[in-house]
Amino acid sequence: MFKSLLDSNKKTGVIMTIAIFDFNRTLYDPNTDKLLPDVVYVLNTLRKRGVSLHLLSRDNQDRLDLLERHGIHNLFDAINFVEDKSPEAFAKIIRDAGVTAKDTYAIGDYLHKDVRFANQCGAHTIWLQRGNFAGQKPEIPDDLPEHTITEIIEVLNLIPC
């Protein structure tokens, strides 16, 4: 389904918005083994608005099981597991989706990876400032997010449909 969605997007020239989400502490709290409040609502709402949803997460043996157990694996157009996040990982998702960085929103809780690497690709960045990394300070200019939120539901006001 993802391939056909991307192919039709490329053929019709329709501009699509994509959202790249981090998993741990952005959608899921590993300390409580629960999704963060409003995650399912946010993902469903963005899908209904026509936003293509992508997950970028470090490869972990139980990560796919967690997505399935919490019932959100089928909400993503693409799930990408990487050994370590990098600007190249973000760029590949953007390229594979057939969009430009200006049509991409990256949402994560870690300034020094999620925000930094998405900024280096030219994507819009949204820092979920909560949990273990809420006190992080930018180390370089690329660590500065375009938007800062404290609850995941706030992305609905930031990602256009």
Image (spheres, grey):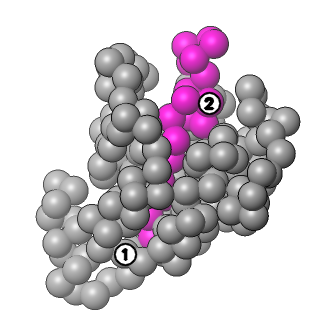
Identity of the residue furthest to the top in this view: 32
Q: Nearer the viewer, residue 114 or 104?
A: 114
Please provide the residue range marked out in magenta: 17-34
Given residues 69 and 31, the one toward you in this image is: 31
Residue 144 appearing in the image: yes
Residue 136 spot, x, y in % from top left: 80, 40
Q: Is residue 53 visible?
A: no
As drawn, the label of residue 99 is: 1
Residue 147 x %, y %: 75, 61
In magenta segment, residue 25 = yes
Residue drawn at 33 percent across, 61 percent down: 92
Q: Are marks 2 and 1 in contact (CB under 8 Å)?
A: no
Residue at x 48% of width, y 74% of height: 101
Per the image, label 1 sits on a secondary structure element best described as loop
Which amino acid type is shown beneath numbered disc 1? Val
Question: What number is the disc on residue 154?
Answer: none
Q: Main secondary structure of the magenta part?
A: loop
- Kindly identify which residue carries mark 2: 25
13 vs 161: above or below:
below
- Mark 2 residue crowding within 10 angstroms, few (<14) / some (14–19) / many (20+): many
63 left or right of 85?
A: left
- Quarter of the view holding residue 133: top right
